[in-house]
Structure formats: C-alpha cells, structure tokens
Image: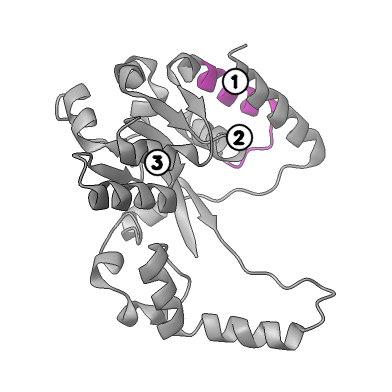
Amino acid sequence: MWGTTGIGYNVEAAAKRLDGKPVDSWEIIFNPGILAKFQDCGIHMLDAPTELIPAALNHLGLNPDSHDKAEIEKAAELLKTIRPYVQKFHSSEYINALANGDICLAIGWSGDVFQARDRAAEADNGVTVNYIIPKEGALMWFDQMAIPTDAANSKEAHMFLDYIMRPDVIAKASNYVVYANGNKASHEYLDQEVLEDTAVYPDEATMENLYVTTPYPPKIQRVVTRAWTAVKSGQ
C-alpha cells in the first residue's frame, strides 16, 4: 500500500479562517501569519522528523531528501517559526481529535485522515474532515510486507504474498482501508469512490510533485534528532 503525508483539516473551520480560500498549499502550514489563524481551534503535527523536515525543505525550494547538515538546520529554523502555534506533536491522536472537532488542522498521513473523515461522518457530529496533497508536493510513503531472512516457512510466505497481490484480493484491501495499492490490474475491482478519490489515487500532475526520501546515515540522523528536539521544545 502507499499514500501521502499532507494536510487534514476541518472544512468549516478552514473556510471561516481563510475567508473561503482553498486549502491547497503548504503556505497554510509554513506561513506563521496564516497558521496563527488556526491556533484557537487546535493544530496537531506528526511527531516525525523524517516527515516534517523533508516537507520544510521542499517548501524552501531545497531537496526534500537532503542529507546536508546546513540545509536540515534551515528546515528546522523554519519549523521553529511555526512551533508556537502547534498544540501537540503526536503521530496518532490527531485522528480522533480531527473527527471529534477538538482540532481543526493537522499534518498527517493520508490514511489516518481518511479514518478521521469517516469517523466524523459516521458520528454525524457536524464535523466535516478533508485531506489534501499540497500543490507544491508531498512525501509518498509505502507500507510493505517483509519476510525475515531466517523465516522457517518462506515458501508459504511467498505464496501468501502472491495471494495478497492478486488484483481482486488487494482491491478488497484497498476498498477496506482506503489506501492505494501497487497493482494497477486491481483498478477494475476497486470501488469507484476509492479509485476516483484524488486524495487516494492522485492525478498525474500531482504525482509529478510527490517525492520519496532515503534513510539518513548515522551522523546526519543525529543532526536530525537534535534539530527535531529543538523544534519540539521551542528552543
């Protein structure tokens, strides 16, 4: 499965604070003057430097996969400018918080925001949640299945992977969790509302702006960890 890291938001709250302007850009997050408008209704962000630092780098016009210490520090400085407006850094609480109307803005994983959207709709609580991939681009993430090298039943594991990737089977999984999958032949079995949802299966123009990242080497990982700690602590 795969998805993106973007912006989840309360539709009504955003319309009110943006005077009806669309939620379509990282400017809403990285422009302190705009983000401040959402402070009163609550903002959450992933507690994940490997998600937020690339987003900040991309916003600065730098390589989101940069392993350059100076560039990573520039991204951290940008994140520090918006830190005063962030209520919490957490990688799961934003789901229920969005669904319940406890917050109105979050940087999160697409699949999580879809859960929030569906929970709010099921609860019929007057909250409408939406998810967008900012027009400047976003991180593309992947969920994988893996077989340990010393697995006792590797033959059966491969048989299971062959099964799960059958077009009709993986389509059922996508229909259930509302994540895109990597088997194009599954499209004929997907629910139309899943296949035609551009937040799940982005159009070609959006796909062009998606990016991926690679693991940081140990020395740079330490730089990232220190920078993230400084961002979260506001120091």
- Mark positioned earlier in the residue sequence (3 or 1): 3
Badge 3 amino acid: Asn
Q: Secondary structure at mark 2?
A: helix
The residue labelled by disc 1 is 231
Q: Is residue 119 visible?
A: yes
Q: Residue at x 32, y 35 (%)?
A: 25
Badge 1 amino acid: Val
Q: Is residue 147 above or below residue 88?
A: below
Image quarter where the C terminus lies is: top right
Q: Secondary structure at mark 1?
A: helix
Left or right side of 216 for 52? left
Q: Which mark is residue 96?
A: 3
Badge 2 amino acid: Pro
Q: Is residue 34 visible?
A: no
Q: Is residue 63 magenta?
A: no
Q: Are marks 1 and 2 in contact (CB under 8 Å)?
A: yes
Q: Quadrant of residue 38?
A: top left
Q: From which residue to which does the magenta span run?
A: 65-80
Q: Is residue 114 above or below residue 192?
A: above
Q: Quadrant of residue 105?
A: top left
Q: Is residue 75 magenta?
A: yes
- The span from disc 1 to disc 2 (Cα, nearest Å) is 10 Å
Q: Quadrant of residue 228?
A: top right
- Depth check: give the residue in front, 204 or 32: 32
